[in-house]
Image: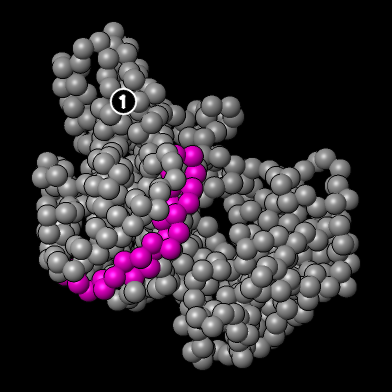
Amino acid sequence: MKLKDLYIDFFLSKNHKQIPSSPVVPENDNTVLFNTAGMQPLTPYLKGETHPLGKRLVDYQKCVRTNDLDAVGDTTHHTFFEMLGNWSLGDYFKKESISWSFEFLTEVLNIPIEKLAVTVFAGNELVPRDDESAEIWKSLGIPEERISFLGVDDNWWPNMEMHGPCGPDTEIFYWRSLDPVPAKHDPDDDRWVEIWNNVFMQYNHDEKGFIPLEHQNVDTGMGVERTTAILEGVTDNYISSIFKPYISLIEQYSGKKYENEYMPSMRIIADHIRAITIIIGENSGVKPSNTDQGYIVRRLLRRAIRHENKLGINVDGDFLSKMVNAIIDDYKVYYPELETNRENTLNIIEAEKNKFTRTLEKGLKEFNKVVSCANGEISGETAFHLYDTFGFPIELTVELAAEKSLKVDEKGFEKKFKAHQELSRAGAEGKFKSGLAGTGEIETRYHTATHLLNAALKVVLEDENIHQMGSNITEERMRFDFNFDRKLTDEEKTKIEDLINSWIEADLQVTKEEMNKNDAVKSGAEAMFIEKYPDMVTVYTIGDVSKEICTGPHVTHTKELNHFKIKKEEASSAGVRRIKAILD
């Protein structure tokens, strides 16, 4: 039996009811592009609504995460993955949850107890240490030296600042190495790999503090791909039984072995085609496009095709259809909509492939234009434009340039590429945030305030090169990261506050305009990572003080913000400062 079947059967024996996987594209939730965790579809029930199947639930959930897209190509990262979860909605709590997790791992999956370690919440000045969980683990046979007490960054969900249901979690780790298992757990040793996380929604956080919930919930999550690799004794997810058939197909069509320099490309192809097959194959109606989910699908498919080309696979042949059919055959027993939509999925992917082939042709024409203007070297910015717009890997640009006796500013390309990666990570705090977050009136006000803060920093610090490097917004505060190399003085912070509040008092109008991306930039609209936006963008203008490309939402007049106050200014990372602020 497969891991999914073993897991479902086990929790059915513990009086859970199986619920079907929700679509990977969320239903009735436009705050996120995809379901990124098993808990997202259950958000209303974790908040108190009654589930029609009762208080004990179990499932496997389709998930997609793209904030680490550029990391795909290593041994563990995936865009599409499956999450196993069991849930208690105000029923059982820590003892049953921990005991059943231990029983499943050691008695059903036959994992030796000496290969397991756990972490629990260490406590702080706001919430006590989770000794209850630690004692349960000890009673089951986990030795004290294999139990690590860690802080809020590791063992608290979702974070200490957010209001709403929250609590400690306990994470279960497996020793994935041929080296002898150490007696003591070291959280910094990467050979200890997390395989399961049990979250205990024990408190409600509001302005009064952390109050114990009357109905406490349990939310657990175990990744299918990682756990399967562990059970099969491999340290590379792509040589597990899940991916092995796809890798074999790539080897067959490319004439190359899964080794050395070919491994990253083969992993990217297998991962990306699996993800787009699942996304397009469900009933959400997603097609490749320049916005939202369609943009992700287009990007994944084009990236896969680039790597097919790199491996020497004939992109005009039947490789893609063979891969898609193989993936549908593997997953249709769990997701029958894939079979229903098989023909439509194949047609959509084939059409997009043909379109991209024509795009590559246009890219070659663009490259020839670049060559005609180049003065001995192709700039990093131009090389990244060829990569991002026309799908040219840097290796292809370098190779073509060498034929023309030109050099390529590869360091400049890497700088642009890393900036692109940073944007992807920042995106995890926006469109890819937790399903328990939302975009209401308060968040809309804070979102607009980030634009004013961005503008005020430039004025007060007299530096037009200051830009937003990331942000996070809750109902209680805004967090804004910006590039700057020193601490702000108290006088500077006061000037920033006064300037922003003068703009608020002036009741400046906030206008919205749709336009072509290049025209937006020419008009003076700011966008630090312009390459991430689609061809058509939305530009928000606030009076004569701010003009930015942004996805919103925003207020219509600045007076709706009331009053701006900086609460804290600190270092975020090297060369990056962080401001936390509130609107009174």
Instruction: Name the spot of residue 303 as percent of width and height, x first.
Output: 37, 40
Task: Name the residue: 67% across, 81% down.
Answer: 12
Number of residues whose C-alpha sits closer than 10 Å to that of mark 1, classed few (under 14), some (14–19) or many (20 or more): many
Please indicate whether residue 557 sits to the left or right of residue 2 in the image.
left
Question: What is the quadrant of residue 318 in the picture?
Answer: top left
Q: Quadrant of the C terminus?
A: bottom left
Q: Position of residue 305 (x, y in %)?
A: 36, 38
Q: Is residue 395 positioned above or below 251 on the image?
A: above
Q: Which residue is mark 1?
A: 380
The residue depicted at 73 percent of the width and 71 percent of the height is: 129
Residue closest to the eye, 428 or 247: 428
Q: Quadrant of the N terminus?
A: bottom right
Q: Was residue 447 drawn as part of the magenta stretch in this picture?
A: no
Residue 189 left/right relative to 501: right
**Dominant SS in magenta:** strand
Q: Is residue 570 visible?
A: yes
**Region of the chain picked out in magenta, as a range:** 557-583
Seen from the viewer's position, the closer of residues 206 and 99 is 206
Q: Is residue 425 left or right of residue 240?
A: left
Q: Is residue 18 left or right of residue 23?
A: right
Under mark 1, the amino acid is: Gly
Q: Quadrant of residue 507?
A: bottom left
Helix, strand or loop at label 1? It is helix
Q: Quadrant of residue 5?
A: bottom right
